[in-house]
Amino acid sequence: MSRLLTTTPRADGFHMPAEWEPHAGCWMLWPERSDNWRGGAKPAQHAFAAVAAAIVQGEPVTVCVSPAQYVIAREMLVPAVRVVEMTSDDSWIRDCGPTFVIDAAGCVRGVDWKFNAWGGLIGGLYFPWDQDDLVGEKVIELERDDRYGPDFILEGGSIDVDGQGAVLATRECLLNANRNPGLGEGEIEQRLRDYLGVETVIWLDQGVYLDETDGHVDNLCRFVAPGEVVLTWTDDMTDPQWARSAAALEILTRARDAQGRSLRVHKLRQPAPVTITAEEAAGVDHVPGTLPRQAGDRMAASYVNFYIANGVVVVPAFDDPQDAPAQALLAKLFPDRRILPVAAREILLGGGNIHCITQQEPAGGGSVTNAGRA
Ligand code: KQY
């Protein structure tokens, strides 16, 4: 049975583990809506299937699929992937799904945040979002885990933890008036402490240029080991991303984590600007209330949006000269994992990337570091 708890993870001795700690598996949702995904979502479905096939090399994967798409998805996904029927509004389980927390005994519980499609009626990306908002509860119940249900809007892509008391976040997103307008910075920090079990919030100001999530940190900067982060980077000072990354670098250079460590920052150079072609834009159904996709629009392409699975790291590839250096850096940072690049343009065209479409479930049973790194 899954109980709804009225306490907090912090009070109960739970915290969110780092993504490099052992997973029980990975959850995904299946893309379908033609007003976000071109070509009736078929190209995106192939890309999602490739991501699932990569992750399942390291850990169990469950893909949640609408009744209408069940047979199609079952056919397109490799047999090792489990497919379950679940209704949703779109396919960004990092954001609408649960955040799992563990305690020292390895017991796992779920945090079921409120979700408002990245801003509700003030700049949100679609309406309605009620089915997405149920995804966290459904996944937690399928796992028979106990559930925290804070009255707090948060997307999983807007935070990144080291599992040792620190969380990265951007003010652009978490302090945006379209998320939790009644709460100030201090109150939001307290929610993060209470529900992620962290001590230290490292605030960056802005996320990636033109990121439609209002600057999710998981596209800008991620922990890769205790005391180490990767930061999306460009050396081109005329690129609008330069000032954002430079400002983040300055903050990170001065920051201390919850253990008092200063951070080692690895620059992960971004690909050349990725813009939507006329053919791609024409393939998206235009529906009032959703974000229009126009030819020439720049997407928020970043290698930082990778997924760390057991034994493998699944990295976006953009058919760009920076693909190889990005993979080489990640191979150095994750020496005990295979780096698996997946062509990610079709995911990016929907507004996010590999990390945004995945959600890890920790294995519990105690915590380890990024093996070989610390
Ligand atoms: O990047 C994400 N975490 C989600 C992007 C949502 C885009 C919806 N069009």
Image (cartoon, grey):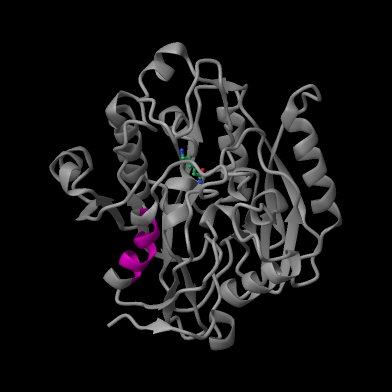
- Which residue shows up at 56% across the image and 64% down it? 18
Q: Is residue 343 left or right of residue 256?
A: left
* Quadrant in which residue 106 is drawn: bottom left
Instruction: Tell me the quarter of the picture where residue 158 sits.
Output: bottom right
Q: Position of residue 40 (x, y in %)?
A: 28, 28
Q: Quadrant of the N terminus?
A: bottom left
Q: Could one spot residue 78 in this view of the protein?
A: yes
Which residue is at 46% across, 42% downward?
Answer: 354
Looking at the image, residue 71 sits to the left or right of residue 33; the answer is left
Is residue 288 part of the magenta span, yes or no? no
Give whichever of 366, 155 is nearer the camera.
155
Name the magenta segment's main secondary structure.
Answer: helix
In the rendered image, residue 134 lying in the magenta stretch gets the answer: yes
Give the answer, above or below, for where 57 lies relative to 237: below
Camera-nearest residue between 349 and 178: 178
Bounds of the magenta span?
132-140
The quadrant of the picture occupied by the C terminus is: bottom right
Identify whether 69 is placed above or below 103: above
Q: Is residue 309 visible?
A: no
Residue at the spot 54% in from the left edge and 61% down from the top edge: 153
Residue 112: image location, x then y, percent: 44, 68
**Total labels drawn:** 0
- Identity of the residue drawn at 52% across and 60% down: 19
Coordinates of residue 14 in the picture (x, y in percent): 53, 80
> Quarter-wise, where is residue 110 in the image?
bottom left
Nearest the viewer among 221 and 195 is 195
